[in-house]
Amino acid sequence: MAPQAVPDAPGGNVPPAIRASGLVKTFGTLRAVDDVTFELAPGRIYGLLGPNGSGKTTLIRLLAGLTLPTAGWAEVLGTRMPSRQNLERIGYMTQADGVYTALTVAENLRFFGAVFGVDGDEPAAAALAVVDLADRRDSIVGTLSGGQRRRLSLACALIHRPPVLFLDEPTVGVDPLLRVEFWAHFRTLADAGTTIVVSSHVMDEADRCDELLFVRSGRLTARGTGREIRARAGTTDLEQAFLRLGGDVAVTR
């Protein structure tokens, strides 16, 4: 039996921050996202987990309104996507570094700040402090290491302090110590009400999330906390749980 769409998680009387209903995205004969439906409550960290090529990036782009669905719809903060106006309330860190290598670190932040209507030096300084790049603010981005560019990409996504944040593989190329600091900041943001969707294929980051959504071949195959998913799969190993629940087992909640 093929995996079925996983039902929404209840959020009491609080409206969901993100909704997806029957989302489908095809590229020719490939169904990159295949009938995905869920609701995500605000102020939580959601881990979107799956192997490379499972459809995580395409799903994020659909939710953020950066690509049109073949069928179904996505909604962020009560607004149907895509919406140009709603982009001001969304932060998006792409899998590839979305920064300008010919500009300095500070110039990149000023540019992205201007795009989102952010004035003054304080937001840029705060974002640089989060990613530990204050001492490189005047450096040309082309001279930075790969890990430093990832850090700058995150700073640019945070510059306007969005209530919804999509992070596509945010810790790739980041050293272990800074990775811990990143996750500590993600937790601080979520505790303050920010809704964060983090895509990853690294299972050891999963337990830092409040809730996990497993994606395989474009379909949502399991949803729940790490503890819940391990219990359903009958294993203490999350990677084994993914393998067991990502095949022909339909998981509901």
Image: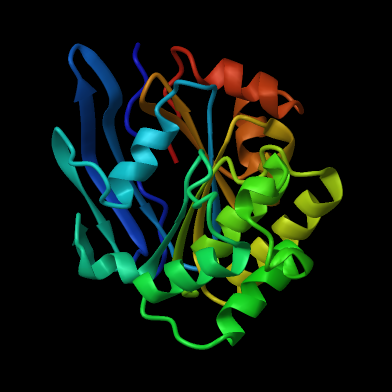
User: For the point 65% across and 78% down, which residue is it?
Assistant: 126
Q: Position of residue 203 (x, y in %)?
A: 68, 32
Q: Is residue 145 visible?
A: yes
Is 172 placed left or right of 3 in the picture?
Answer: right
In this view, the residue in front, 62 or 210, is 62
Q: Position of residue 51 (x, y in %)?
A: 54, 22
The quadrant of the picture occupied by the N terminus is top left
In this view, the residue in front, 243 or 198, is 198
Is 111 placed left or right of 70 in the picture?
Answer: right
Q: In the rendered picture of this protein, how many numbered marks are placed on residues?
A: 0
Residue 103, placed above or below residue 176 = below
User: Which color scheme did the rendering employ for the protein?
Assistant: rainbow
User: For the point 74% across and 36% down, which residue is it?
Assistant: 204
Displayed quadrant of residue 47: top right
Q: Position of residue 105 (x, y in %)?
A: 61, 63
User: For the point 53% across and 44% down, which residue is it?
Assistant: 97
Is 58 placed left or right of 216 in the picture?
Answer: left
Displayed quadrant of residue 24: top left
